[in-house]
Image: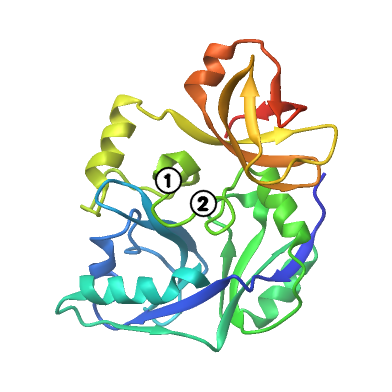
Amino acid sequence: MTSDFLTALPGRAVIAITGADARSFLQRVITRGPEGLEPGGALFSALLTPQGKVLADFIIFDDGDGGLLIDAPASEADGLIKRFSLYRLRAKAEITLRSDLGVAAARGEGEAELRTVALAAATDPRAEALGLRAIVPVGGPEDETGYEAARIAAIVPEFGRDYGPGEVFSTDVNHDLMNGIDYRTGCFGGQEGASRMHRKGGVRKRTVRLDMDAPAPLAGAAVSAGGKPLGAITSGAGQRALALIRVDRLEAAGNETVLAGDAPARITLP
Protein backbone atom coordinates (compact mmCIF):
# COMPACT_ATOMS: atom_id res chain seq x y z
CA MET A 1 0.00 0.00 0.00
CA THR A 2 1.35 3.41 -0.95
CA SER A 3 1.33 6.17 1.70
CA ASP A 4 -0.03 9.70 1.53
CA PHE A 5 2.24 12.53 0.45
CA LEU A 6 2.53 16.29 -0.01
CA THR A 7 5.44 17.58 -2.08
CA ALA A 8 6.61 20.30 -4.42
CA LEU A 9 7.83 18.96 -7.77
CA PRO A 10 10.97 20.98 -8.57
CA GLY A 11 11.45 19.30 -11.94
CA ARG A 12 8.36 21.06 -13.27
CA ALA A 13 7.78 24.57 -14.63
CA VAL A 14 4.66 26.62 -15.32
CA ILE A 15 3.85 28.23 -18.67
CA ALA A 16 0.94 30.69 -18.83
CA ILE A 17 -1.03 31.21 -22.04
CA THR A 18 -3.55 34.05 -22.02
CA GLY A 19 -5.60 35.96 -24.57
CA ALA A 20 -8.69 35.47 -26.70
CA ASP A 21 -7.14 32.68 -28.79
CA ALA A 22 -5.20 30.94 -26.00
CA ARG A 23 -7.16 27.72 -26.45
CA SER A 24 -8.03 27.66 -30.12
CA PHE A 25 -4.46 27.74 -31.45
CA LEU A 26 -3.34 24.98 -29.06
CA GLN A 27 -6.31 22.85 -30.04
CA ARG A 28 -4.71 22.40 -33.46
CA VAL A 29 -1.27 21.25 -32.37
CA ILE A 30 -1.38 19.09 -29.21
CA THR A 31 -2.74 15.59 -28.68
CA ARG A 32 -5.65 16.67 -26.47
CA GLY A 33 -6.77 20.24 -26.92
CA PRO A 34 -7.88 22.54 -24.09
CA GLU A 35 -11.17 23.78 -25.52
CA GLY A 36 -13.89 22.93 -23.03
CA LEU A 37 -11.51 22.77 -20.05
CA GLU A 38 -13.16 24.42 -17.04
CA PRO A 39 -11.94 25.73 -13.66
CA GLY A 40 -11.32 22.86 -11.28
CA GLY A 41 -10.32 20.52 -14.09
CA ALA A 42 -7.09 19.46 -15.75
CA LEU A 43 -6.13 17.44 -18.81
CA PHE A 44 -3.08 15.54 -19.95
CA SER A 45 -1.65 16.26 -23.39
CA ALA A 46 1.55 16.18 -25.43
CA LEU A 47 3.41 17.67 -28.34
CA LEU A 48 4.66 15.10 -30.87
CA THR A 49 7.16 14.97 -33.70
CA PRO A 50 5.73 14.48 -37.22
CA GLN A 51 6.54 10.77 -36.78
CA GLY A 52 4.52 10.58 -33.56
CA LYS A 53 7.30 10.58 -30.97
CA VAL A 54 6.92 12.58 -27.77
CA LEU A 55 8.72 15.93 -27.69
CA ALA A 56 7.17 16.78 -24.32
CA ASP A 57 4.02 16.09 -22.38
CA PHE A 58 2.26 18.26 -19.83
CA ILE A 59 -0.81 18.84 -17.69
CA ILE A 60 -3.05 21.82 -18.52
CA PHE A 61 -5.16 23.76 -16.00
CA ASP A 62 -7.74 26.49 -16.47
CA ASP A 63 -6.37 29.62 -14.77
CA GLY A 64 -9.83 30.73 -13.64
CA ASP A 65 -9.85 33.72 -16.01
CA GLY A 66 -10.14 32.04 -19.41
CA GLY A 67 -6.44 31.38 -19.83
CA LEU A 68 -4.28 28.32 -19.27
CA LEU A 69 -1.54 27.24 -16.88
CA ILE A 70 0.66 24.45 -18.24
CA ASP A 71 2.54 22.15 -15.86
CA ALA A 72 5.51 21.09 -18.00
CA PRO A 73 8.94 19.49 -17.57
CA ALA A 74 11.31 22.29 -16.55
CA SER A 75 13.93 20.97 -18.98
CA GLU A 76 11.56 21.53 -21.90
CA ALA A 77 9.87 24.79 -20.86
CA ASP A 78 11.93 27.15 -23.02
CA GLY A 79 11.60 24.84 -26.03
CA LEU A 80 7.85 24.56 -25.58
CA ILE A 81 7.50 28.34 -25.40
CA LYS A 82 9.41 28.68 -28.67
CA ARG A 83 7.32 26.02 -30.40
CA PHE A 84 4.03 27.37 -29.11
CA SER A 85 5.08 30.85 -30.26
CA LEU A 86 5.69 29.51 -33.77
CA TYR A 87 2.34 27.70 -33.85
CA ARG A 88 0.53 30.79 -32.58
CA LEU A 89 0.90 32.58 -35.96
CA ARG A 90 -1.53 35.54 -35.77
CA ALA A 91 -3.58 34.20 -32.89
CA LYS A 92 -4.23 36.57 -30.02
CA ALA A 93 -2.31 34.81 -27.28
CA GLU A 94 0.51 35.64 -24.89
CA ILE A 95 2.90 32.88 -23.83
CA THR A 96 5.10 33.39 -20.76
CA LEU A 97 7.19 31.39 -18.32
CA ARG A 98 5.87 31.98 -14.81
CA SER A 99 9.01 31.70 -12.71
CA ASP A 100 7.00 32.72 -9.64
CA LEU A 101 4.87 29.59 -9.87
CA GLY A 102 5.59 25.92 -9.35
CA VAL A 103 3.86 22.54 -9.26
CA ALA A 104 2.95 20.39 -6.27
CA ALA A 105 1.18 17.10 -5.66
CA ALA A 106 -0.61 15.59 -2.67
CA ARG A 107 -2.59 12.52 -1.76
CA GLY A 108 -4.65 11.90 1.34
CA GLU A 109 -4.54 14.37 4.22
CA GLY A 110 -2.19 16.71 2.34
CA GLU A 111 -4.77 17.46 -0.35
CA ALA A 112 -6.75 19.89 1.81
CA GLU A 113 -3.56 21.76 2.76
CA LEU A 114 -2.47 21.96 -0.87
CA ARG A 115 -5.81 23.43 -1.94
CA THR A 116 -5.35 26.34 0.47
CA VAL A 117 -2.34 27.64 -1.49
CA ALA A 118 -3.24 26.48 -5.02
CA LEU A 119 -3.98 28.86 -7.87
CA ALA A 120 -5.39 25.89 -9.79
CA ALA A 121 -5.88 22.30 -8.65
CA ALA A 122 -7.44 19.09 -9.92
CA THR A 123 -7.21 15.34 -9.58
CA ASP A 124 -4.19 14.21 -11.61
CA PRO A 125 -5.74 13.49 -15.03
CA ARG A 126 -3.37 10.59 -15.70
CA ALA A 127 -4.51 8.50 -12.71
CA GLU A 128 -6.77 9.18 -9.73
CA ALA A 129 -4.33 7.23 -7.54
CA LEU A 130 -1.88 10.14 -7.85
CA GLY A 131 -4.22 12.40 -5.89
CA LEU A 132 -4.27 16.18 -6.31
CA ARG A 133 -2.07 18.11 -8.75
CA ALA A 134 -1.78 21.88 -8.32
CA ILE A 135 -0.19 25.10 -9.52
CA VAL A 136 1.19 26.93 -6.49
CA PRO A 137 3.57 29.77 -5.58
CA VAL A 138 7.11 28.53 -6.08
CA GLY A 139 8.72 26.75 -3.13
CA GLY A 140 7.34 24.41 -0.49
CA PRO A 141 8.51 21.12 1.00
CA GLU A 142 10.22 18.68 -1.32
CA ASP A 143 10.01 14.96 -0.65
CA GLU A 144 9.02 13.07 -3.78
CA THR A 145 9.42 9.60 -2.26
CA GLY A 146 5.70 9.01 -1.74
CA TYR A 147 4.79 10.56 -5.07
CA GLU A 148 7.28 8.35 -6.91
CA ALA A 149 5.99 5.22 -5.18
CA ALA A 150 2.39 6.13 -6.10
CA ARG A 151 3.35 6.96 -9.68
CA ILE A 152 5.06 3.63 -10.23
CA ALA A 153 2.28 1.69 -8.49
CA ALA A 154 -0.24 3.36 -10.85
CA ILE A 155 1.93 2.62 -13.94
CA VAL A 156 2.33 6.28 -14.86
CA PRO A 157 5.60 6.82 -16.76
CA GLU A 158 6.91 10.37 -16.51
CA PHE A 159 8.91 12.58 -18.84
CA GLY A 160 12.44 13.13 -17.57
CA ARG A 161 12.43 9.96 -15.50
CA ASP A 162 11.28 7.24 -17.87
CA TYR A 163 11.90 8.90 -21.26
CA GLY A 164 13.22 12.04 -22.90
CA PRO A 165 12.39 14.14 -25.96
CA GLY A 166 12.02 12.20 -29.20
CA GLU A 167 12.78 8.82 -27.62
CA VAL A 168 9.39 7.09 -27.54
CA PHE A 169 6.04 6.96 -29.29
CA SER A 170 3.08 8.17 -27.26
CA THR A 171 1.65 4.67 -26.95
CA ASP A 172 5.02 3.34 -25.68
CA VAL A 173 4.40 5.38 -22.53
CA ASN A 174 0.66 4.74 -22.33
CA HIS A 175 -0.59 8.21 -23.30
CA ASP A 176 -3.61 6.66 -24.98
CA LEU A 177 -4.49 4.75 -21.81
CA MET A 178 -4.15 7.90 -19.66
CA ASN A 179 -6.63 9.91 -21.73
CA GLY A 180 -3.80 11.95 -23.25
CA ILE A 181 -4.75 11.58 -26.93
CA ASP A 182 -7.95 12.62 -28.66
CA TYR A 183 -8.08 10.64 -31.90
CA ARG A 184 -11.43 12.11 -32.95
CA THR A 185 -10.72 15.82 -33.33
CA GLY A 186 -8.00 18.20 -34.43
CA CYS A 187 -5.02 17.61 -36.67
CA PHE A 188 -2.12 17.68 -34.23
CA GLY A 189 1.42 17.02 -35.34
CA GLY A 190 2.13 13.29 -35.48
CA GLN A 191 -1.57 12.43 -35.60
CA GLU A 192 -1.34 10.28 -38.72
CA GLY A 193 1.15 7.87 -37.23
CA ALA A 194 -0.55 7.82 -33.83
CA SER A 195 -3.97 7.21 -35.37
CA ARG A 196 -2.65 4.45 -37.62
CA MET A 197 -1.22 2.57 -34.64
CA HIS A 198 -4.48 3.04 -32.75
CA ARG A 199 -6.72 1.85 -35.60
CA LYS A 200 -4.64 -1.14 -36.65
CA GLY A 201 -3.68 -2.33 -33.19
CA GLY A 202 -0.03 -1.83 -33.99
CA VAL A 203 1.13 -1.10 -30.43
CA ARG A 204 4.11 -3.38 -29.86
CA LYS A 205 5.58 -1.64 -26.80
CA ARG A 206 4.09 -0.65 -23.49
CA THR A 207 5.34 0.64 -20.18
CA VAL A 208 4.48 -1.97 -17.53
CA ARG A 209 4.99 -2.43 -13.79
CA LEU A 210 7.35 -5.00 -12.33
CA ASP A 211 6.85 -6.27 -8.77
CA MET A 212 9.74 -8.02 -7.08
CA ASP A 213 10.61 -9.57 -3.72
CA ALA A 214 13.81 -7.52 -3.48
CA PRO A 215 14.79 -3.91 -4.25
CA ALA A 216 14.25 -3.08 -7.92
CA PRO A 217 17.34 -2.90 -10.14
CA LEU A 218 18.44 0.51 -11.39
CA ALA A 219 17.14 2.09 -14.56
CA GLY A 220 18.65 0.45 -17.62
CA ALA A 221 18.59 -3.08 -16.20
CA ALA A 222 17.46 -5.62 -18.76
CA VAL A 223 14.08 -7.34 -18.58
CA SER A 224 13.91 -10.80 -20.15
CA ALA A 225 11.90 -14.02 -20.28
CA GLY A 226 13.10 -17.44 -21.35
CA GLY A 227 16.51 -15.98 -22.14
CA LYS A 228 15.08 -13.52 -24.65
CA PRO A 229 15.09 -9.73 -24.16
CA LEU A 230 11.81 -7.94 -23.53
CA GLY A 231 13.03 -4.43 -22.72
CA ALA A 232 14.55 -2.45 -19.86
CA ILE A 233 13.69 -0.80 -16.57
CA THR A 234 13.10 2.95 -16.80
CA SER A 235 12.55 3.90 -13.13
CA GLY A 236 11.98 2.25 -9.77
CA ALA A 237 10.84 2.73 -6.19
CA GLY A 238 11.33 0.11 -3.50
CA GLN A 239 10.44 -3.32 -4.84
CA ARG A 240 8.59 -1.97 -7.87
CA ALA A 241 9.76 -0.59 -11.19
CA LEU A 242 8.47 0.58 -14.54
CA ALA A 243 9.85 -0.99 -17.69
CA LEU A 244 9.35 -0.39 -21.39
CA ILE A 245 8.90 -3.81 -22.98
CA ARG A 246 7.84 -5.51 -26.19
CA VAL A 247 4.40 -6.88 -25.40
CA ASP A 248 4.46 -9.21 -28.40
CA ARG A 249 7.60 -10.86 -27.03
CA LEU A 250 6.00 -11.12 -23.58
CA GLU A 251 3.03 -12.93 -25.12
CA ALA A 252 5.35 -15.24 -27.05
CA ALA A 253 7.23 -16.08 -23.83
CA GLY A 254 4.09 -17.69 -22.40
CA ASN A 255 4.67 -18.93 -18.85
CA GLU A 256 8.43 -18.32 -18.82
CA THR A 257 9.71 -16.52 -15.70
CA VAL A 258 10.28 -12.81 -16.21
CA LEU A 259 13.62 -11.51 -14.92
CA ALA A 260 14.56 -7.92 -14.08
CA GLY A 261 18.31 -8.17 -14.17
CA ASP A 262 18.74 -11.50 -12.35
CA ALA A 263 15.70 -11.12 -10.10
CA PRO A 264 12.32 -12.77 -10.80
CA ALA A 265 9.58 -10.23 -11.41
CA ARG A 266 5.82 -10.21 -11.82
CA ILE A 267 4.49 -8.02 -14.64
CA THR A 268 1.34 -5.91 -14.47
CA LEU A 269 0.14 -4.49 -17.77
CA PRO A 270 -1.30 -0.95 -17.82
180 vs 254: above or below: below
75 vs 228: above or below: below
Q: Residue furthest toward the left?
A: 90
**Crowd tier of the residue under label 1, counting other residues whose Cα lies within 10 Å: few below 14, some 14–19, many 20 or above:** some
**Crowd tier of the residue under label 2, counting other residues whose Cα lies within 10 Å: few below 14, some 14–19, many 20 or above:** some
Q: Quadrant of residue 147?
A: bottom right
All told, the count of numbered labels is 2
Amino acid type, residue under disc 1 in the picture: Val
Residue 163: give its label: 2
Question: Does residue 177 appear in this view?
Answer: no
Question: Does residue 187 appear in this view?
Answer: yes
**Residue at x-position 30% and y-position 43%:** 183
Quadrant location of the N terminus in the rendered image: top right
Residue identified by numbered label 1:
168
Q: CA distance from mark 2 to mark 1?
A: 7 Å
Q: Earlier in the sequence, mark 2 or mark 1?
A: 2
98 vs 88: above or below: below
Quadrant location of the C terminus in the rendered image: top right
270 vs 91: above or below: above
Q: Nearer the viewer, residue 243 or 151?
A: 243
x, y percent for residue 53: 35, 48
Q: Is residue 138 left or right of residue 214?
A: left
x, y percent for residue 215: 82, 41
